Image (tube, rainbow, N blue to C red):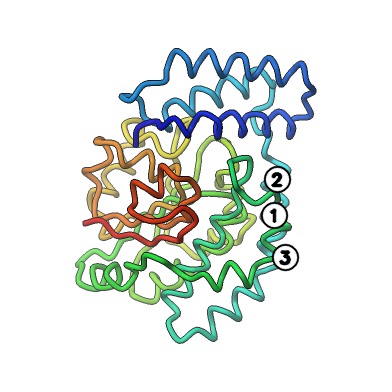
Amino acid sequence: MKVDPQCVPCLLGRILYEVKLAGGGKDVQKKVIKRALEIMSKGFSEKVASVELATEVHRETYSLLGDDDPYREVKRRSTAVAKELLPLAENYYREAEDRLTAAGTLAVVGNLLDFGIMDAITGPEVLKENFRKYVSEGLHVNHLRRAEKLLLESKDRTVIYFTDNAGEVVFDRFLIEEFKNRGAKVFLVPKGVPILTDATVEDLQEADLLEMVDGIYKTSTFYVGVEIEKMDEKLKKAMEEAALIVYKGMANYEAVSEPEGYRYRPRMFIMKAKCEPVASSLGVKKGENVALLQL
């Protein structure tokens, strides 16, 4: 997905949030904003991918802050809140008539644990206070039964599952369970390098997911979303052979909607469309919940 003018204020808001997390004052804010504007002024183009520009801005911001993981405390809080909500989520899932849809709904609700972007919730505690309301929204686009059919008809029922945010991954357990119940082997792909609120292997371990799955791959670069061209060759091969590839969150969607990501299909995008450009590209309204299958 190419960069949109609306990406600019969103990106500026996010790096200001990063400065705040790192304890930076007004002088640091000015330095970071000035540098970000220089990068965006030079790099903003209809030919540039949104994640490419965002990655460059965040890389420079981290460097100026001298902090390789300013989100570490927010990620810790997100995981703690998600774990507190787990009994409530478990009850919702177990009592659902359609557990597959319930699992997909919980995966999207977890996608709210993303901070610093425009119109995002202000902290993990907001999810705790409004959990039932968010769950009641359900899925506005629900292709999970199509994905199930695809999986059951496949000889190799392997699912490659690109995770998104720390805390959010706690709620991914239900969809993982649904895939496993249909005979699938599930391999998670967290970040190999800390960036934003994205989950690393350590976050998956904290979420008690590692014992649920058949293996782990990792992305290897500091990048917003997934940098397809620089993925490990073993991961590329696994994706080529997989019955289904699941991408959680907007950044992964933005990254693999670029041409180099087209070769890896079938794929499913699971997210809340939190901004107008992404919502428009998906054909939904801003704020709607999506489980979209592309063959």
Instruction: Give the residue pinned by disc 2.
Output: 74
Q: Name the residue at 62% across, 55% down.
A: 167
Residue under the point 63% across and 73% down: 132
What is the total number of numbered labels drawn onto the structure image?
Answer: 3
Lateral position of residue 90 relative to residue 2, left or right: right
Give the residue drawn at x 29%, y 36%.
Answer: 258
Q: Is residue 255 above or below residue 140?
A: above
Q: Secondary structure at mark 1?
A: helix
Task: Name the mark nearer the viewer: 2 or 1.
Answer: 1
Q: Residues within 10 Å of mark 2 (few under 14, many from 20)?
A: many
Cα–Cα gap, marks 2 and 3: 17 Å
10 Å crowding of disc 1: few (<14), some (14-19), many (20+): many
Q: Secondary structure at mark 3?
A: helix
> Label 1 near label 2: C-beta < 8 Å?
yes
Residue that badge 1 annotates: 124
Under mark 1, the amino acid is: Pro
> Amino acid type of disc 3?
Glu
Question: Quick one: SS at disc 2?
Answer: helix
In this figure, which residue is indicated by the disc labeled 3? Answer: 129
Structural distance between the alpha carbons of marks 2 and 1: 8 Å
Look at label 2 and name its amino acid.
Val
Q: Quadrant of residue 115?
A: top right
Q: In what quadrant of the picture does the N terminus appear?
A: top left
Residue 65 is situated, as x and y percent measured from the top left of the image, at 69, 21
Q: Is residue 13 or residue 188 the one in the foreground?
A: 13
- Left or right of 127: which side holds 270? left
Q: Is residue 241 left or right of residue 291?
A: left
Q: Where residue 138 appears, x then y in whole percent?
A: 48, 71
From the top left corner, tell me how far across and down residue 219 is, in percent: 44, 39
- Local crowd size for mark 3, using a 10 Å CA cut-off: few (<14), some (14–19), many (≥20): few
